[in-house]
Amino acid sequence: YAALHLSPRPVVIISPESLGEGASSAWAQGGIAAAMDTADSAQSHAADTVKAGDGTVDPKIADLVTQEARAHILNLTALGTPFDRTENGDYVMSREAAHSFARVVRVKGDQAGSEIMASLIERVRETPSIQVLEATMALDLEVSDGRVIGVAIESANGQRSAPVMLRGSAVLLAGGGSGGLYALTTNPPRIRGQVIGLAARAGAEIVDAEFVQFHPTAMDVGEDPAPLATEALRGEGAILTNDQGERFMQAIHPDAELAPRDIVARAIFAQSQAGRRPMLDTRDVLGEAVKTQFPAVAEACARNGIDPALEPIPVAAAAHYHMGGIATDAEGRASLGNLWVCGEAASTGLHGANRLASNGLLEALVFARICSVGIAAAVPATSAALIKIAFEDGGTPSDPEAIAELRQVMTANVGVVRDAAGLESALRKIAALEAANKSSVSFLNMTATATLITASALAREESRGAHCRSDFPDTLPGDTRRSRLTLNDAIIIRTKICEATR
């Protein structure tokens, strides 16, 4: 979206997979939150966003993003996105958790992300000023005098390759979050915090790293990553029960299944910890219609021998979205010069401690445009020759066993419910894994982000939004500070923990 806005300036897109594959945006099921109904308003949407963020949302950013939402839906429609429409042409709107109004625009029930990406990718392929380098992974940022001047890349097709440095007039990071750092996640396999980590290793400031959102209804079917049972199912009236048939959300929150995600996720987690397998029951409200209205859910169920029209779907809380990330200002600029960030890798101040459902794609679109405006102002409108890359042998790939161990550590100790002992244990284990794998730059990017999440979680001695400390269960009164750390700050915390146990 940013590249299209920057046309005809020459842009190179670095993509580890074929463009759009393996991207969190393409996997997004729910849709985009936007006040499209005349009875709704951007002000109401902003108020819901601030409320869900539990005292850490920047209200100016919430106003900015929600005011722009309608324009981006109309623009995507013009670009060919086939949003669900009523017989009279209005957008079909769904209600999701913590929204006071039905304002989530969908495509084919649960196909919003993939259909939006498909329409954008088609336009990108048609735009001569955009070059896409596929099967290519970003590894490092080159910084000079506090400004980013290049990006080191390597082959992403499994071969050992020496890094190649690309240099350009501006760098935009839009490489996703960190959910794949957890053993139980809904994120694509490559989304393991590398983009946040490479920016942190270059010296960028990281904000709100401790706020990781766990989606309450990942399908508990043994797949990695876990298929997602979209929140729109609960918006349609699906209920949560356990394997004893007991409905448990009504006693926890007045909105029951449509309570904020952090509350539902903790309730799901508590059921699992108590040995009561949580289930999502769509039978009474959707029946056979679930198979046509929510094709991604139906496909995942069929793949695992579940008939959602006849039986409930087993679910678990899984790492889903990182509210924290690389600190940006209202223009999408990071703390390093010449660096812009949009999407899940950024922390703009929109999501706070608990992202409002379906605000993720919206934020990505709004800040893609904002970043493109800033880059266009900084970069002259010139042409450039196509880049030709030839990777040579070299480099050290990440060890799959080390990655698996890191993911288990994060799920066990930095998950839905945390405490000081577990977080300190995680920091020691992350440090040991890093020391044993320091020749793999990609793995260092992962451990950098894992360290930032864990150190920030240890420093925040309260429970707020998605951050739940069993040893500090109360929320401190009033709005609170946003956590701000560099990687050096986080390593100081980690080193003190490691030294204290020697």
Image (cartoon, rainbow, N blue to C red):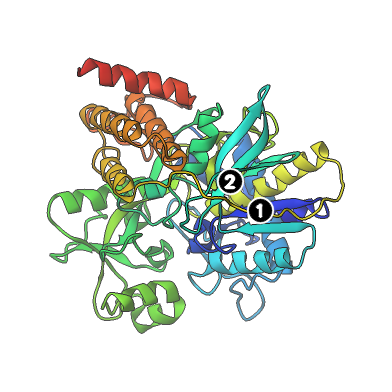
Horizontal arrangement in the rendering, residue 375 relative to residue 210 (left or right)? right
Q: Amino acid at mark 1?
A: Ile
Residue at mark 1:
389
Q: What residue is shown at x 58% (from left), y 46% (from top)?
A: 153
Kind of residue indicated by mark 2: Ile
Q: Residue at x 79, y 57 (%)?
A: 129
Given residues 196 and 479, the one toward you in this image is: 196
Residue 216: quadrant of the picture? bottom left
- Quadrant position of residue 303: bottom left
Residue visible at 28% across and 31% down in the picture: 432
| Helix, strand or loop under label 1 | loop
Distance between the alpha carbons at the discs numbered 2 and 1: 10 Å
Within 10 Å of the Cα at label 2, are there few (<14), some (14-19), or many (20+) other Cα atoms?
A: many
Residue at position x 30%, y 41% from top? 410
Q: Looking at the picture, does residue 450 appear above or below residue 191?
A: above
Q: Quadrant of the C terminus?
A: top left
Q: Nearer the viewer, residue 162 or 287?
A: 162
Q: Give the residue furthest to the bottom.
A: 288
Residue 48, how many percent across, how many down?
A: 51, 46
Residue 351 at what x, y percent from top left?
Answer: 51, 41
